[in-house]
Image (cartoon, grey):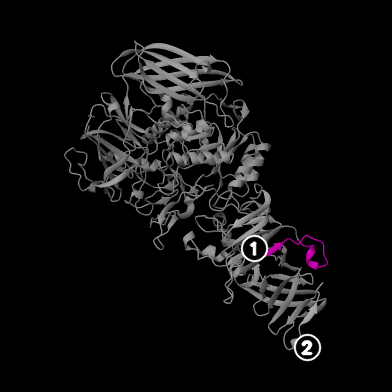
Amino acid sequence: MTPKLCWLDDPEVYRVNRLDARSDHYFYEGDEDENAFVTKENVRRGGRLYQSLDGVYKFAYSVNASLRPKDFYRTDFDSSAFDEIKVPGHIELSGYDRIQYINTMYPWEGHYYRRPAYTKDAGDGAGMFSEAEYNPVGSYLKRFDLDEGLRNKRVIIRFEGVEQAFYLWLNGEFVGYAEDSFTPSEFDLTPYIKDKDNLLAVEVHKRSSAAWLEDQDFFRFFGIFRSVTLIAKPGAHIEDMWAKPVLYGDNEGGFGLSLRLSAAETMNCYINIRLSDKEGNEESEILNVTASKEVAADTEYILKEEKISKVIPWDNKNPHLYKLLITLCDENDNIIEKVPYDIGFRRIEIKDKVISLNGSRLIINGVNRHEWNKASGRCIDIQDMLKDIRIMKHNNINAVRTCHYPDNASWYYLCDSFGIYMMAECNLETHGTWQKLGEVEPSYNVPGSIPEWKGAVMDRAESNFHTFKNHTSVLFWSLGNESYAGDNIAAMNKFFKDMDGSRLTHYEGVCRNRDYEDVISDVESMMYATPKDIEEYLSNAPKKPYILCEYMHDMGNSLGGLGSYIALLDKYQMYQGGFIWDYIDQAIEVTDEATGEKVLRYGGDFDDRASDYEFSANGIVFADRTEKPAMQEVRYYYGLH
Amino acid sequence: MDCIKVIFGDCTLGVQGDREGRSFELIFSYAKGGLVSLVSDKKEWIYRAPQPAFWRALTDNDRGAGFHLKSGIWLSADMFIKTANIEVTLDKKEYGFPAAPLTNDFKSAVEGNILKVKYTYETVTNPVTAVSIEYEINSDGEIKVHAHYFGKEGLPELPVFGVRIIMPTLAENYRYEGLSGETYPDRMTGGKQGVYDMEGLSVTPYILPQDCGMHMDTDWLEIYRKKVLDNTKNEERLSVLRFEVLNTAGAGSLDTAHGKFAFSCLPYTPSELENALHREELPTPRRTVLTIYGAVRGVGGIDTWGSEPEPPYRVSGEEDHEVGFRIVV
């Protein structure tokens, strides 16, 4: 297949040869101790089937596609003129291309006149990004040998996050293309990979049609900003798993499971499914099932729900997890693959228009969280995440909304482990297509009801769901943020409802187009409503339980009046709390051009125009993760319920 | 009980007294419209005459709500003010404004028990309103301060009302009894009552400098200073000046006022904070800017693009406000 630059422009091309999204489980070979690869905080890493490709890459920056080194992926290409860059990282923070912060406006405001393809009179978008004078390209090259543990196996490559569109080659052969900056993209490398001297080539484009869907209020970066990993599959392999723990009553359990398996060559396997305490003690076993199955290239296995008596429910106060261990054996009892996954039993439902968790009314003492580090932007590490967890636990924050994109996978594991309720949001925001200077003006809104935009947003929903479906902490699937409402978002809602009756859907933007309120969002969600607005809704035949997906805009010295919202929790059963906007100031540490001191800068400080300046900093912690003074108020009020 | 000694100068009014053996000296200026000197523990505590405070640096929420567009007049009122009247009363004898040549009649320093000096100011607002700051010094060595804002129909909401005292050098630390952390009227429920020691004069590192460091519901406050500007003194001796609520029953007319006060103790004036777009643009910290408030606008939090703080946390310009405190040498 020949890659085409015009894919950048076409909203109907968002993945080429990219593998279907799958569960984020880890897997190990039979002789590996799966317990050796997990920290006490429940953060896993791979064993010998995994090879990190993070590190130094050869790199070239081009200001637009016509100036990029077009043949750089060829094995005979002379890359001696290339620079070096660290992966993961943002290209802008590595010294190439301008840093820009902008909120609802598209980043080309004032530079390009653009309308999304297939909106009113806009045409098909041909050349919008692929031929733009300014649309930078990062060309990455990496030579590597395959680690011993991955040889002679099927090998895939996993990009955890590449912003915003990229083409991939291995050893001179085109492998695939993907958009969606914040969900993992995997490709099969088996046909092309060698034991020694492989050449990986990744061409990352700053903007594509995906830009219309990624108009989040944040610094606008590009590049490979999350990890890159090679993963080898054992002869028989669990491609995808969906564990379905169920809670009945106070402590009656049920457990079902569906697996998608593959084998390099068709083979008979035994599948053993075991549930026990976290340590895996035999006497703690609550389930142990073995089935035999012929595993071919694509095989389904379903364990129908089994009743389990006496489980300890999972919640914020007691995030009790069980260890699920799935083992694949061959006919001679040789273990081929082991998949451990910690799961919890909990039940989220709406009863009498009130959201309940495990039978009790759910109260959300939440916060919106962008991934941020003052030095490395949205490229954060596990220490940043652990710090965030500690701060949340210390200040009685019990819920987090992943605004407005899926986070680094480790974050979901931490939330399971520490009992943080998650509103897991899809990577979608099209703010500038429907709101201009504060006014609702959806004349060229996407995705709207435009057929050509449906596939891309459905893919975002599917990726979010399939990647994180096993995480106990995910209580809500959020369709996206501030994208107005139309048939396409209704289709996302339907997808989640059809797939997963065990969780609730959330989307605030439907309040801007109430025609869709019966088919989008299980909850009435608003942002920045005043306490009076909330009372008005709840006093007039409310249809749905009410939450604030954003409230208490904590920009600078703020967070006054929290008590008036908390008081509503006692007054209205259907008011169930909200998520403070937001967790951390987005500001970048640079060297002051005047004094040489380290200082924090915000939008507009990089000659970036247009910009929304200091609007990037609305955290309850500063950009260095020290708590703002307002935190004592959060701790007090969030400690009341 | 020693009397206080009052020196009727041609341009100033000097006062010498002591409190429990600790002597102090004050100079009230007629030209500068206020108390230009307070020497306690042989240290000067006043850099420029205390003035009514109307402004606090805008917060992001203030800016979002367009508060500056409605109430910006208080910024200039805070920076520029006219002294309209000065009245001196010693032991119930009313001198009015004791201008020369009246001062020739005194022959020497005068002794007395209760001295009152009242400055009345006129704001540069439209309409104009009056503010008074009254000082009362008695033979117990008490120094009481009371400020009164006269509300006027047509005046916009105030950011704050209080008295600002600028000290010549940067304080080492301060100590207060009140609520933990930085609190505002609509963000103080989480504050815990206690006695707190604050190292240095920290400016909360909001990325865009703005008002900060407010402490609501304070019983007392002590400021600790070492540095002086006096070229003859190079010792680095720690001295303290204490400010406390006027809540005890007493003979003075000011004792009727007030429970707890709010304060902030920063190295910057509101306009210095207002001028900086980044922390690194703030000047080198060199003074102690203490403001004691009787009324403070809340910070709000509903949003940063239009919502005001909730009504109980807004300060009307049409109503009276006051603040009182005692300075303890």
The part of the image, by quadrant, that contains residue A74 is top left
Nearer to me, A63 or A438: A63
- Which residue is disc 1 drawn over? B223
Nearer to me, B104 or B177: B177
- The mark found on residue A537 in the picture is none
Q: Residues within 10 Å of mark 2 (few under 14, many from 20)?
A: few
Q: Is residue B256 among the parts visible in the rendering?
A: yes
Q: Amino acid at mark 2?
A: Asp
Q: Where A18 sits versus B298, above or below?
A: above
The part of the image, by quadrant, that contains residue A205 is top left
Give the mark nearer the N terminus: 2 vs 1: 2
Q: Secondary structure at mark 1?
A: strand
Q: Residues within 10 Å of mark 1 (few under 14, many from 20)?
A: many
The part of the image, by quadrant, that contains residue B117 is bottom right
Instruction: Measuring from the top left, give residue A370's x and y in whole percent.
Output: 47, 43
**Badge 2 sits on which subunit?**
B
Q: Where B224 sits versus A177, above or below?
A: below
C-alpha distance separating marks 2 and 1:
39 Å
Farthest left residue in view: A76
Instruction: Measuring from the top left, give residue B304's x and y in whole percent.
Output: 54, 52
Q: Residue at x 55, y 18 (%)?
A: A253
- Which residue is disc 2 drawn over? B105
Q: Secondary structure at mark 2?
A: helix
**Badge 1 sits on which subunit?**
B
Instruction: Measuring from the top left, give residue A320's x and y in whole percent.
Output: 55, 26
Give, as a single range, the part of the protein colored magenta: B241-257
Q: Amino acid at mark 1?
A: Ile
Q: Is residue A610 among the parts visible in the rendering?
A: no
Instruction: Measuring from the top left, give residue B324's x and y in whole percent.
Output: 73, 64
- Would you say A293 lies left or right of A471 here? left
Where does the C terminus of chain A fall, quadrant-wise? Answer: top right
Mark 2 touching mark 1, by CB under 8 A?
no
